[in-house]
Amino acid sequence: MASALKNLSEYNEQNIPSATGVRFGIVVSEWNTKITHALYQACYDTLVKHGALETDIHVIQVPGSFELPAGAKMMADRLKVDAVLCLGCVIKGETSHNEYINYAVANSLANLSMVYGKPFIFGVLTPDTEEQALDRAGGKHGNKGVEAAITAIRMADLRKKLGEDKPKIGF
Ligand code: DLZ
């Protein structure tokens, strides 16, 4: 299994576009706070490291990961953000609740990306155990918050390069 062998958050810094002038929204789930805070800190630091202005990074908290898409939509509707990053951690329990949450969040964020034509990043850990989560929140497999930030920067840059969305009807 690839994740057993490497830090999943390694990337070539030279290939990352500048994030200066890009407006970001970060939505953080309060469930498993120790882990989501570690994701958030790495995410925020990575955005700033690549040039994002602190005044261009807007942050809100939601109760749990299930609320991430609603929080993301509120941000997209109220703030002129170029990308929304959703950070959460859903640990498998005795029942299948985690599957319902994970699929709902993944599908909703994918739909929001299509509807708004801008990136809504799935920065949600879906581990079986807390140990697996910690491994991916600053542990031996890196930090998913870094990956979320890099993905947001790259996708916002791609959108900018391709130009503004064109109206679908009319002239
Ligand atoms: C209810 C619940 C449970 C059991 N586990 C988690 C979890 O591991 N991670 C997480 O982010 N949220 C969890 N939640 C809360 C749900 O995401 C949601 O907040 C509630 O079901 C209310 O809609």
Image: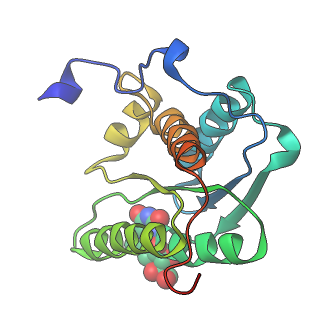
Question: Which percent across, then down, holds residue 46?
Answer: 64, 30
Of all residues shown, which one is farthest toward the front? 171
Horizontal side of residue 134 vs 43, given as left or right? left
In the rendered image, the vertical position of residue 151 relative to residue 28, given as above or below? above
- Quadrant position of residue 52: top right
Residue at image position (56%, 49%) is 36
Q: Which of 72 and 133 is in front in this view?
A: 72
Horizontal side of residue 70 vs 133, given as left or right? right
Horizontal side of residue 130 vs 33, given as left or right? left
In the rendered image, the vertical position of residue 42 relative to residue 167, given as above or below? above
Q: Which of 57 and 6 is in front in this view?
A: 57
Of all residues shown, which one is farthest toward the right? 55
Counting the numbered discs, the total is 0
* Figure colour scheme: rainbow
Of all residues shown, which one is farthest toward the left? 1
Question: Which percent across, then down, holds residue 51?
Answer: 74, 28
Q: Which of 5 and 160 is in front in this view?
A: 160
Ligand 1: give its quadrant: bottom left
Q: Nearer the viewer, residue 127 or 50?
A: 50
Q: In which quarter of the image is the C terminus?
A: bottom right
Question: Which percent across, then down, holds residue 132?
Answer: 32, 39
Residue at image position (54%, 61%) is 118
Residue at image position (72%, 44%) is 22
- Quadrant position of residue 86: bottom right
Q: Quadrant of the N terminus?
A: top left
Residue at image position (60%, 47%) is 160
- Quadrant position of residue 101: bottom left
Of all residues shown, which one is farthest toward the bottom? 170
Question: Which percent across, then down, holds residue 24?
Answer: 70, 51
